[in-house]
């Protein structure tokens, strides 16, 4: 038996009001800012779940890959030194692997990654911060939300041509839809695959290799022609 003198709560008197209070409480829990340790723990778990390099590409082929240097942006200036890395673009994700400098293989798993959908990409070119020496071939990616504690990052290429190659790809990629990316990079099922050109490098597979001093090499042999010389009597 219920107690006759107990007053009904607001949730019992009005179920709709009770539902609103529960929703408000849930929103407050979701909006609660994580502490620094909680953020570090969440980022650490996220890095563990990142795909290895073999899964970022397809059988060793990548949508976009190159050697760059990057650092986070503190406003319009770098927040730290430029770190060499190997960057792979896959869909709307930008994977950053350690050890991208010449002579060093990139790490098996990425150091971090960025979701660049709807991001803003801008050419900086020469980045001068007196009295430090200038940086050249720099471009900036500003994300819509903070990722790994920062919202913007600077990337530096070795040459102007390499910087413009990344700019052309990223400007299209950040605005492209999932269907456009899939149509451009995914193989078309059911269609015949046609080889449009031959590989003319020394590692070409359409020429049989030969053994030369214990090494397998491929090269074109010149035809030997014999000239007929008429001897005068």
Image: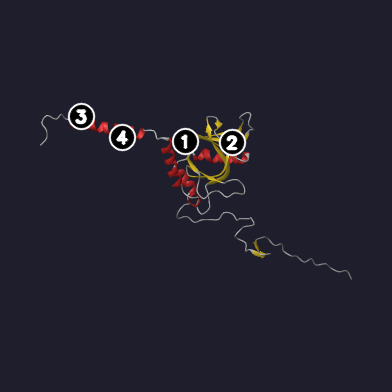
Sequence-first tag of 4 and 1: 4
Circle 1 or circle 2, nearest the eye: 1
Residue denoted by label 2 = 138
How many neighbours does mark 4 have within 10 angstroms: few (below 14), some (14-19), or many (20 or more)? few
Residue denoted by label 4 = 26
How many neighbours does mark 2 have within 10 angstroms: few (below 14), some (14-19), or many (20 or more)? many
Residue denoted by label 3 = 10
* Residue 94 seen in the figure: no
Circle 2 or circle 3, nearest the eye: 3
Indicate the position of residue 84 as horizontal and vertical percent values.
58, 42
Residue that extends furthest to the bottom in the rendered view of this protein:
233
Quadrant (top left, top right, bottom left, bottom right) of the N terminus: top left
Q: Say whether residue 226 is left or right of residue 181.
A: right
Residue that extends furthest to the right in the rendered view of this protein:
233
Give the numbered dot on residue 149: 1
Sequence-first tag of 1 and 2: 2
Indicate the position of residue 230 as horizontal and vertical percent values.
84, 68
Give the residue displayed 27% in from the left and 33% down from the top.
22
Q: Say whether residue 17 is left or right of residue 66.
A: left
Local secondary structure at mark 2: strand
How many neighbours does mark 1 have within 10 angstroms: few (below 14), some (14-19), or many (20 or more)? few
Give the residue displayed 51% in from the left and 39% down from the top.
172
- Mark 4 and mark 1 in contact? Answer it, CB < 8 Å: no
Sequence-first tag of 2 and 4: 4
Sequence-first tag of 2 and 3: 3
Find the distance from the CA under tag 1 to the CA under tag 3.
Answer: 41 Å
Based on the displayed image, in which of its 4 quarters is residue 168 positioned?
top right
Find the distance from the CA under tag 3 to the CA under tag 4.
Answer: 18 Å
Find the distance from the CA under tag 2 to the CA under tag 4.
Answer: 43 Å
Find the distance from the CA under tag 1 to the CA under tag 2.
Answer: 21 Å
Find the distance from the CA under tag 2 to the CA under tag 3.
Answer: 60 Å
């Amino acid at each position: 038996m219920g107690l006759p003198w107990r007053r009904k709560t607001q949730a019992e008197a009005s179920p709709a009001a009770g539902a609103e209070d529960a929703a408000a409480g849930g929103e407050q829990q979701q909006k609660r800012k994580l502490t620094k340790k909680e953020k570090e723990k969440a980022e650490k778990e996220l890095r563990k779940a990142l795909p290895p390099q073999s899964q970022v590409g397809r059988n060793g082929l990548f949508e976009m890959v190159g050697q760059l240097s990057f650092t986070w942006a503190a406003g319009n200036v770098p927040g730290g030194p430029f770190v060499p890395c190997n960057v792979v673009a896959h869909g709307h994700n930008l994977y950053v692997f350690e050890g991208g400098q010449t002579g060093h293989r990139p790490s098996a798993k990425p150091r971090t990654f960025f979701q660049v959908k709807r991001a803003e990409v801008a050419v900086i070119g020469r980045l001068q911060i007196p009295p430090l020496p200038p940086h050249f071939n720099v471009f900036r990616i500003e994300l819509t939300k903070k990722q790994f504690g920062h919202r913007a990052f600077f990337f530096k290429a070795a040459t102007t041509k390499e910087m413009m190659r990344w700019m052309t790809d990223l400007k299209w990629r950040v605005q492209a839809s999932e269907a456009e990316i899939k149509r451009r990079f995914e193989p078309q099922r059911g269609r015949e695959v046609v080889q449009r050109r031959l590989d003319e490098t020394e590692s070409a597979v359409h020429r049989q290799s030969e053994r030369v001093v214990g090494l397998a090499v491929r090269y074109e042999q010149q035809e030997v022609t014999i000239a007929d010389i008429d001897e005068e009597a």
